[in-house]
Amino acid sequence: MRTKLLVATRNRGKLREIVHFLQDLPIEIEGLEVFPELPPVEETGSTFLENARTKALSVALQTGLPSLADDSGLEVEALGGAPGVISSRYGGREGDDAANIARLLREMEGLPEESRRARFVCVLVLAHPDGLWVSVEGVCPGRIAEAPRGTGGFGYDPVFVPEGLERTMAQLSLEEKNSLSHRGRALRALRELLERGEPSWFWERV
């Protein structure tokens, strides 16, 4: 019997990455499209962990299923860590990738390459309806390109160049991206936990 895992997102790109990473584990993974009546969880935390924990616990409580939520974003050194926890709405409207990228590039216009350092951060929280939870984190360092390149991925992928590469995240294959992305690193840490049978409360539902 497969353990059910509800991923607290309606972002198809994000869900596809998570399924790809965990697909051969004895887990049945679904996204929030199976619960269309659930209202969005307001992200009021000041850290990625606070937001991910709030989302995971809220969805787990409302559905009665173990839930996985992430909060991730971009931190740019020259902007004092912005956009940070407001990465998905940096351009004004939630999930408007083009507007987010346009504002970022506008604010970084004219900065030399050595001043374009940035990192992607992802915090994953797996929560139980009883209120138990665990978290893992992944970080991917890199820099911001001067213009978007590539058509893959989502979010800031077209302008983020991972450390040691010349291509943006949006120019990488899914396999390449998962091997070095912040979400890939967080999912790898989560997978290691699950393969060890942790947390025990997740597997007890089998």
Image (cartoon, helix red, strand yellow):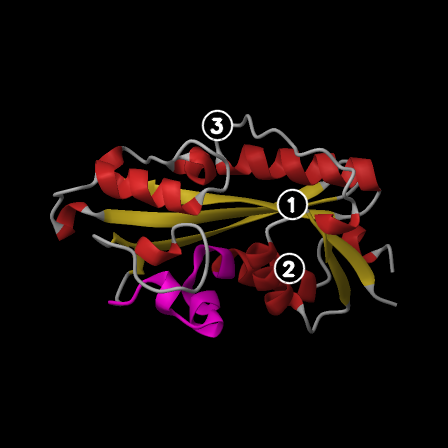
Quarter-wise, where is residue 40 in the image? top right
Judging by the rendered image, the residue that carries numbered circle 1 is 134
Which quarter of the figure has residue 25? Answer: bottom right
| Mark 2 surroundings: few (<14), some (14-19) or many (≥20) residues within 10 A | some
- Amino acid at the residue labelled 3: Ser
In the image, is residue 176 part of the stretch drawn in magenta? Answer: yes
Q: Return the disc, 1 or 2, that comes first in the chain's sequence.
A: 1
> What's drawn in magenta, residue-wise?
166-184
Q: Which percent across, then down, holds residue 13?
A: 55, 58
In this picture, residue 3 sits left or right of residue 195: right
Q: Does 6 sit above or below residue 2? A: above
Q: Is residue 181 visible?
A: yes
Q: Which residue is drawn at the image coordinates 23% and 48% (left, top)? A: 117
Tell me the SS state at disc 2. helix
Q: Residue 193 carries which label?
A: 2
Q: Is the magenta stretch mostly helix, strand or loop?
A: helix
- How many numbered tags mark residues here? 3
Q: Where is residue 85 in the image (x, y as percent from the top left)?
A: 45, 35
Q: Give yes or no for contact between labels 1 and 3 (Cβ–Cβ under 8 Å).
A: no
Q: Earlier in the sequence, mark 2 or mark 3?
A: 3
> In this view of the protein, which residue sits in the foreground, 26 or 148?
148
Which quarter of the rendered picture does the C terminus lie within? bottom right
Indicate which disc, 1 or 3, sits on the residue closer to the N terminus: 3
**Residue at 85% across, 55% down:** 204
Which quarter shows the N terminus? bottom right
Judging by the rendered image, the residue that carries numbered circle 3 is 46
Of tags 2 and 3, the one toward the viewer is: 3
